[in-house]
Amino acid sequence: MANEKDAHACTLDKIISLCKRRGFVYQASEIYGGMAGAWDYGPLGVEFKRNIQNEWWHYMTQLHDDVVGLDSAIFQHHTTWEASGHVGHFSDPMVDCCECKARFRADTLIEDYCENHNAKTDKPVDTMSHEEMKAFIDANINCPTCGKHSWTDVREFNLMFKTYQGPVATESSLVYLRPETCQGIFTDFKSIVQSNRMKVPFGVAQVGKSFRNEIIFKNFIFRTCEFEQMEMEYFCKPGTEDETFDRWRKDRWQFYLKYGIKEENLKWHHHDKLAHYAKDAYDITYNFPIGFEEIEGIHSRTDFDLSQHMKYSKKDMSYIDQDDGNKKYIPYVIETSAGLNRNFLMFLCEAYEEQNVGTDGAEDYRTVLHLDPRLAPITVAVLPLMKKDGMAEKAKEIQQELKEDFVTDYDQSGTVGKRYRRQDEVGTPFCVTIDPGTLDSSSPEYNTVTLRFRDSMEQVRVPIAELTARIHQEIKNYTRK
Ligand code: ATP
């Protein structure tokens, strides 16, 4: 039986249920039975996702003088994907059950088996050949769907979605939905250098949709066919890539701490098997309820990308370093590649708490999201204590003013305690309550409101005239206790 602590722990099911109930995330095409691997972001989800994206953008481009932004097209010339290696190599190992036809990613099938059965492979799974995977599966694993034991060979499956541009489907009209955002950064490298007089070293940041025809979708929004990436390619002089790699590893780690992720919930995963062009690669993994899983990859990619585009396009992609005697070279690249949707799930899991706020030994649990106020979908909720005696009108007036600076919500239904709970559950850091004192010119509380803090549940009285400034100050000084 689950103990007291377990019963109130964060689980993926609880997060999924909260997301649906409160309008963060819905199953796409639910009225038609749902679409595998596709999710819609509801009214609160879209605000929350946008806030994560905006904070990432602010952090990467505003706070780093050497990083500029880009928004390149989803569709790129099909040669882009030949040059990048995606047409030839962007695939996962796949294996099918011959009995029930269920399909699996061979590497995850092995990893899941090892985790559930305390078993080990002779070498890291990502370094195993197809034959080695097949041998391990044949020797150990029954189909998780039907329980039988008859497997196909392990073979590669290309993850790119294909379509055709224009009315006729021919080889020359073939286009791909991009599986990562960064190739547009590489193909635009020369334009960015020339138009913005950029000097190496510098980075280019981009946020946008990517598409992957994943073999299996699982764990809610963790692995989907359509997702958003927040990527940055940093171009540096050959020979400086190791220090640049270390710099960005440290920097990206700090980003997560800054927005409230506890350091013990983050872990580095070093890639044992590197892509043929890569010099080094690490993932930042987060301690999801399903275990430590990747949220961001940081890769040292050598000059592979620019060299490949130079070879395929026959355009010179080299850089002339005026600060180093006009030396000509192809810059090396350090990439930071984070998933926006996985960040979304991570921040929700990190923030989620079922907290006993009962007094005198009584149990009274509230669900609260301790989100950083910069990420919370609603910043301030305005609540009249009662609808009568002009309180609702005054509350609307105050909300109108706050709207200029913050995302606000207005709620007048139910007891104020219940309304606080509803706001806690979606992570609203501040509630403003208007009561009879606010409107009573003979009261010392005249023209003041109650400002209530989500995490501590403390309440302070604040003059209406100082409310906006006070909330700004609280956001700036916020740290999760
Ligand atoms: P994984 O090993 O989980 O498939 P990956 O190593 O292929 O991920 P990258 O190509 O490095 O991932 O992509 C960078 C980031 O994009 C990942 O860290 C992840 O946050 C996000 N991402 C990649 N694939 C998906 C997906 N199918 N759904 C949601 N996010 C994804």
Image (cartoon, rainbow, N blue to C red):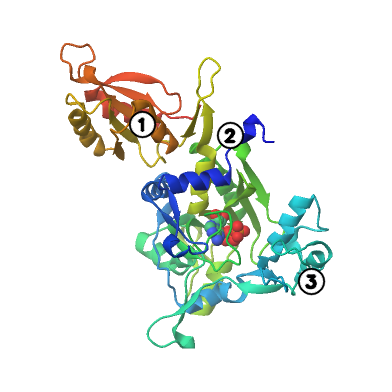
- N-term-proximal mark, 3 vs 1: 3
- Disc 3 marks a residue whose amino acid type is Glu
Give the mark nearest the N terminus, 2 or 3. 2
Whether residue 314 is visible: no
Residue 334 % position (x, y): 56, 56
218, above or below 306, in the image:
above
| Distance of label 2 from label 3 (alpha carbons) | 44 Å
Question: Which disc, if any, is residue 8?
Answer: 2
Q: Which residue is mark 1?
A: 419
Residue 189 visible in the current orientation: yes
- Residue nearer the viewer, 369 or 259: 369
**105 horizontally vs 147: left or right:** left
Please give the label number shown on residue 131: 3
Q: Compare residues 219 and 429 and report the one nearer the observer.
A: 219
Q: Quadrant of ligand 1?
A: bottom right
Q: Residues within 10 Å of mark 2 (few under 14, many from 20)?
A: some
